[in-house]
Image (cartoon, rainbow, N blue to C red):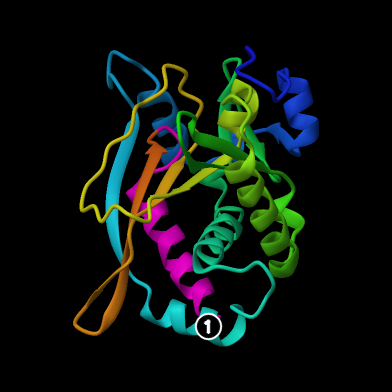
Amino acid sequence: MKKRGRYASMDTKTLLERYEGRPLDIENLSTFEKWALDYFENPKNISDPTLEITLELDITAANDAYRKRHASTEGSSFTAYLTYTLFKTLGEHYSFKCRFFDNKWYIFDNPPLIFPVATGGSERFSDVLIENVHTMDWSEFCNTYRKKVDKARADNAAFEQMSDGVWYTGYFIGNLPNLRFTGMKVHEAASKTGSPFFYFGKRFERDGKLFVSLYAMMDHRIADFYVLGKLIEDFEARLVE
């Protein structure tokens, strides 16, 4: 995979070692899953396997749970809580852990977290990479998250992108705190790697409840709205545990 910036380029073998990847056991998938991998891969059937949806989530109870049990942790924020909980939930749903490299499907047990931070000025954005989130508890994540975000905002160096391999292996979970959106569409990469993308929007109140928009993009070869529904159900439950 070609290099995109300051994060060194990694070949597939290195990515598998670093992010605990292994070949996907396609033979043990269900009949439907094997059909989907084949059908949505073929451009004669589908020109683009990408699925996109914007959801409106009631996070009233999640905000209460955060304030009661998690807000006192040093470096914490509700955005970090939403991000951390979604990341942990994704790790329990294998469809979102699969990636397609070098004409093969792999599954990664420890992918990195990737998100952009608005820095202002001519650079506008900086990419943040947090590795080994899978092993972090809430306190460790808060500390790492806050340091990475603060550094991104304070760093005046020229913007550099990370390598393609790291970018497409990770979970992209962005945040747009100033935009309340009811629909969204992001650019689609020429390389179809199966990596999912998520964006939280501006939080808002309605009828005494707190809501947030959540944009999700996934690859129909390996994921669909059914598994997304299961993911969101699990995510909402984890937020209030």
Horizontal side, residue 133 vs residue 190: left or right: right
Q: Residue 113: in sight, yes or no?
A: no
Residue at 78% from the left image edge and 24% from the top image edge: 14
Where does the magenta region start and end? 221-241
Residue 93 location in percent, x, y?
55, 53
Q: Residue 220: in sight, yes or no?
A: yes
Residue 225 part of the magenta segment:
yes
Closer to the camera in the image, 14 or 155: 155
Horizontal side, residue 177 vs residue 15: left or right: left
Residue 32 location in percent, x, y?
41, 40
Most distant residue in the bottom direction = 68
Closer to the camera in the image, 239 or 92: 239
Residue 209 location in percent, x, y?
28, 81
Q: Amino acid at mark 1?
A: Arg
Residue at 77% from the left image edge and 22% from the top image edge: 13
Residue at the spot of label 1? 67
